[in-house]
Structures are given as C-alpha cells and as structure tokens.
Amino acid sequence: MRQRAVISGIGVVAPTGIGTADHWLAGLAGRSGIRELPDRTASGLPVRVAGQVPGFDETEFVANRLIVQTDRWTWMALAATDLALADAGLDTRKEFPFHLSVVTAAASGGNAFGQREIHALYKEGPRSVSAYQSIGWFYAASSGQISIKHQLKGACGVLVADAAGGVDALAQARRLIGRGTGVVVTGGTEAPLSPYAMACQAGQQTLSRDPDPATAYRPFAPDATGQVPGEGGAMLVVEEWRRAHLRGATVYAEVAGSAATHDATDATRPPMQSGQYARAMREAIARSGCTPDDVDAVFADGAGDVSGDELEARALREVFGDRRVPVTVPKTMTGRLCSGGAPLDLAWAALAIRHGMLPPTVNVDAREAARRHGLNLVTEAREGTLDTVLVAARGAGGFNSAIVLKAPEYEE
C-alpha cells in the first residue's frame, strides 16, 4: 500500500508574524517585516536592514531552565513546533513515541550563544564558559530539543544545505513516512542577526548594502542590489494521509515529489549556468507524476542579485518554455532566512493551496520582470485554483532543491 505524506499542521515564527493566521494575513496584504537593524548590531557593518520577528517572547514557549541552555534560533524552532502541533491537533503524549520523528534544516546555528561564550572565554578564561556551549550553538540543537520536549523517538536528524535545506528536510520527512513512520515534524528556523553572525555574513558579495527596507531586497528587478538576511522560519507536521484523514485532521497539501542536485563548480561563487537548478525542478515535477504544464505556480528562490536572478529566470525558462507560469517570491517580505526560508515558503505554498490565493512579491515591478526575464511575477495577492505548486530553493555552495505540493485528493 502506497504511503502518502501530507502536511497537516503549520507553525510560523517569522517577520510577517507569529502564528499561521497573522503570517498569512500579513503576506496577503504585502506587509513587510524587513526593518532597520539596531545600531548595536549594524555598527561598523555594511548591512543596515534585516527581516526581524516582532514581539517574540521566548518565555511563552520555552521553560526558563531551557532558555539558558539554548539559543534564539532554537527558541523559535520550539515555538513553531508547538504552534504546528496545535494546528494539527496532535498531542504527542498520546502517541507511540517510536512512530514520531523530527528532521530540521540548519545553517548558522546558535550564533548569539556562541558569541557570548567566546567573549567570556577570551575575557575571563575557560572556567567562565557555560557547560551548554557544546550543545547550544550546535546545528542539531533544535532537532534534539524538539525531540526531547515532545518525546519524538523515531528517526531524527538535521540537514545542512543553506537555503535549500528546508526543502531537503521535507523530502526526508516524505521518505520516512514512506518507510512507515507515522508523523514527522520538519522545517527550520534561523536567528542569524547577532553581531557575530552579521560580521560573518558581511563579506558576502550578494548581500545588499541598501539601507532602505523598501528597496534593499528586490529579486528580478533590473537594479537589484542583493539579498537581505532575516530570522525566523516555520515548522510543519507531516503524516501519512490515511492516518491524518482518520483522525479528522486538516490536510493542507500532499508532498508529491522532490529532487536535489548540486552545481559542483565552486564553493562560494554561483555557477555561470542554470542546468543543475533546472534539473532539480524537472525531476521533482516528474517524480510527482506531473508535467510542467500541470504546475499552477512557482515559489521561486529569489537570489536578489542581478546574476543570480538571471540564472533562476533561465532555469525557469528551461523547465516551462514559453509558458508564463505564475512566479512569486513572498520572502521579499521577510528577507532570506537561511535554512528558515524554504520552510516558510513551504508553509506559504501549503496555505496558498488551501485558500486558493498566491501571496505577492513586494517592491518589484511585474512589467520590468516580464520585460527583462519573461516572468509572470505575482506582485499582488492573486486568487485562483492551485492544485500543483512547485517550491524551489538554492543554497550557497551550489545546492539546488525543488519539491512539488499538490492539493489533497481523497483515495479509497
């Protein structure tokens, strides 16, 4: 019997809001969460703006004893997981723990925690360093803490592929469902806005130096200046379709097929060709049992720099030919959230399928995108039937990933 993986719960902690409802309404309205960075963070750095989560209070989601052991990125992951499980109506205490798993994506890790402990090390010596330093910064910290809190004792892990990691994590969740796992919590969050993290990012040539939140991140614009960092992300509850149906859960979308490739050219510079990125999209579509003509919309990666945007537009043309499939980059409202970006796009895509609405790309002229790249860029919330949606992502170092979500279909 074929095991179908579906998304039955969504939890969001993002610059567009905390909780699915606030995030969705802000997205449809085009309300951006990209704002000026505090002076203490941006001082001496060329980066002046970032996507920032408003009003996040970790004490609402994380016990005090755990707050001192973990970093902000893990606090956000724990919060998003709580929200996703509540949305799914799933009480893990009533489930068989060995049928529950977690797979997250990670990139920058607990950088604020690490910064604090490195400062203590050099200022006061080794005895001043917290015993939790060895786990607080670690890229697997969120998977571990989610597993402990909710007693998820099945196959657990973490994937590292920069901004493509969230797509890979959902693909792994689908594989686990196919092998008999009942529920997988998957997704990712990031908090890469500490002074240390910002200093590490400052040398990236693709980072926007524009101080204006409204113009700093404008993928597919002729005067695009680069990407904008941000914090937050999303967590998803993925489960076997019949299981979700029998317990009366809301099913947002089915995870139909995925693929990942690598440019294999250079560790830092983007490739000069789009073939591997296009191949990831084509294979994801084919593995979902669809053709490019079946795809109703694309959630694009949106590099935000001129050369990266041209490569993505070229890849889309390779896959879809002359067909002007609707393309949207709603992360223009949040910035690129490292490993939290793709999970947030996946949450957006699942909600779009559920509600029949595409969130917009903000601050970009659709006519310019059409003229320059031949794209049908969605710049205002657009209503329509969305049965098949492609989510594509690229990570620094050459990672390419794509996944297809489909409207859920009843099956006897």
Image (cartoon, rainbow, N blue to C red):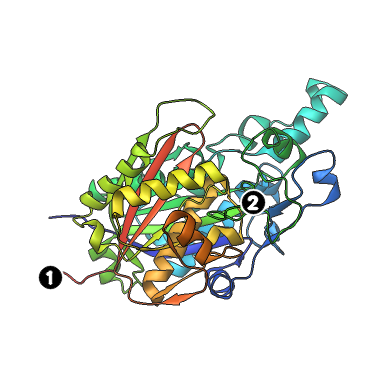
* Three-letter code for the amino acid on which mark 2 is drawn: Gly
Secondary structure type for disc 1? loop
Residue at 58% from the left image edge and 75% from the top image edge = 29
Residue 101 shows in this picture: no
Q: Quadrant of residue 88?
A: bottom left
Query: Along the horizontal axis of the image, is 115 left or right of 391?
Result: right
Residue 268 in percent (x, y) is at: 54, 29
Query: How many marks can you see?
Result: 2
Residue at 37% from the left image edge and 46% from the top image edge = 315
Quadrant housing the C terminus: bottom left
Vertical arrangement, residue 45 with respect to residue 256, above or below? above
Residue 232 in percent (x, y) is at: 60, 54
The residue at which mark 2 appears reads as: 230
* Three-letter code for the amino acid on which mark 1 is drawn: Glu
The residue at which mark 1 appears reads as: 412
Tag nearer the camera, 2 or 1: 2
Quadrant housing the N terminus: bottom left
Residue 267 shows in this picture: yes
Could you say which disc has been placed on residue 145 in the image? Answer: none
State which tag comes first along the sequence, 2 or 1: 2
Closest to the observer, 389 or 65: 389
**Residue contact at pointers 2 and 1, CB within 8 angstroms:** no
Residue at 31% from the left image edge and 56% from the top image edge = 404
Residue 119 in percent (x, y) is at: 81, 30
Vertical arrangement, residue 284 with respect to residue 370, above or below? above
Closest to the observer, 343 or 37: 37
What is the distance, in whole Å, between disc 2 and disc 1 at their CAs? 43 Å
Residue 138 in percent (x, y) is at: 59, 34
